[in-house]
Every structure is written in C-alpha cells, then in structure tokens.
C-alpha cells in the first residue's frame, strides 16, 4: 500500500488517503503539461459540449467545470468533486484529507480568495473557480497559444 500524500497546500501540510467511495466529478484540472494536454483535448470538443463548460485558466493551470459525463478525460488530470462536508472546496474524487473536510475547508478559506476553491494536492495548488466563465473556443485557443509561448521561452 502506498503511503498517503502529504503535500503542502496554502502553507498547511495535509495528508491525503484514498477515498472509500469516490466523489462524482464536477470539474477536471491540470497543472503544467497536463494543463496543456487538457486544453488541447478540450479544444477538440464539439461546440455544444464546449459551451456547456465553465472554466478558469492561469499560468500552467486549467480547470474546467461541467457534468461528469461531459468532462474530457486526460491522463494525469485531477477530477474534482464536492464533498458535502466541505461544499466550498472541489476535492479530488479519489482522495480525501485525513483531517475533517470541514476543518480543511475553514483553514483553506481563511485568506485564500473566493470560494469555491479547487484543491490540487499533488501540485500543492489552490485555484479559485469563483470567476469561472463559459468556455469560448477563442479564449481557449488564446490560452493555449500563451502557454506554448511560455514553454518555448
């Protein structure tokens, strides 16, 4: 059995373990190369599917929100769901914190931006998805181009 993950998130060391019952995915996220792969996969989606998602993107990170059946599947992406004990967080579907989710939520929301927050333990990243906007093909293409320029430089 693998030891639990213990990345530092927002300055807090948090141990994670496999979830007995996975959460239903409501979002998918990628960091670094996985974000690029996710962006390229999303860009190939049909117009109707693309229009059904909302998302946020930043340097080296992409988070798409939508129904479980519509979200693109990309190797290495983190699929996120809502734990009823921490509704302001989007947590990995397959992992749970070893601390009470409500305590983690309270700690992460203290000064960490607007909820909901996508929690990406392996990367030690928090992403506010409060400003998620409908995904437009032109915006996604512009983000992919900007990421390619950063990788090239």
Image (spheres, rainbow, N blue to C red):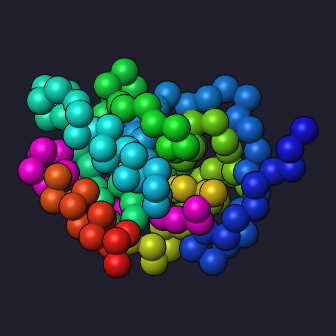
Up-down: is 66 above or below 17? above
- In the rendered picture of this protein, how many numbered marks are placed on residues? 0
Name the residue at the right extreme: 1
Query: In screen coordinates, is 142 left or right of 88?
Result: left
Query: In screen coordinates, is 121 left or right of 138?
Result: right
Let me know if residue 10 is in the magenta part: no
Q: Residue at x 50, y 43 (%)?
A: 77
Where in the figure is residue 148, as x and y percent of width and height? 30, 63
Q: Residue at x 39, y 60 (%)?
A: 61
Most foreground residue, 28 or 131: 28
Is residue 66 visible in this depiction of the protein? yes
Name the residue at the top extreme: 69
Let me know if residue 130 is in the magenta part: yes
Up-down: is 38 above or below 124? above
Up-down: is 8 above or below 32? below
Where in the figure is residue 12, as x and y percent of width and height? 67, 72
Residue segment shown in magenta: 123-140
Is residue 82 visible in this depiction of the protein? no
Res 41 quadrant in image: top left
Q: Residue at x 37, y 69 (%)?
A: 151
Q: Residue at x 37, y 53 (%)?
A: 36
Where in the figure is residue 110, as x and y percent of width and height? 50, 73
Query: In screen coordinates, is 121 left or right of 132?
Result: right
Res 123 quadrant in image: bottom right
The quarter of the rendered structure image containing the N terminus is top right
The quarter of the rendered structure image containing the C terminus is bottom left
Where in the figure is residue 16, as x and y percent of width and height? 73, 51
Name the residue at the front extreme: 152
């Amino acid at each position: 059995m693998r030891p639990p993950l213990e990345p530092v998130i927002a300055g807090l060391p948090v141990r994670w373990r496999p979830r007995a019952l996975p959460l239903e995915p409501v979002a998918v996220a990628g960091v670094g190369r996985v974000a690029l792969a996710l962006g390229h996969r999303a860009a190939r989606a049909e117009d109707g599917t693309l229009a059904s998602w909302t998302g946020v993107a930043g340097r080296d990170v992409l988070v798409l929100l939508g129904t479980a059946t519509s979200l693109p599947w990309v190797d290495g992406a983190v699929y996120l769901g809502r734990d009823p004990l921490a509704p302001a967080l989007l947590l990995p579907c397959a992992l749970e914190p070893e601390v009470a989710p409500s305590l983690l939520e309270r700690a992460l929301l203290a000064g960490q931006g607007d909820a909901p927050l996508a929690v990406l333990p392996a990367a030690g990243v928090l992403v506010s998805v409060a400003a998620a906007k409908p995904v437009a093909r032109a915006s996604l293409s512009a983000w992919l181009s900007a990421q390619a320029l950063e990788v090239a430089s």
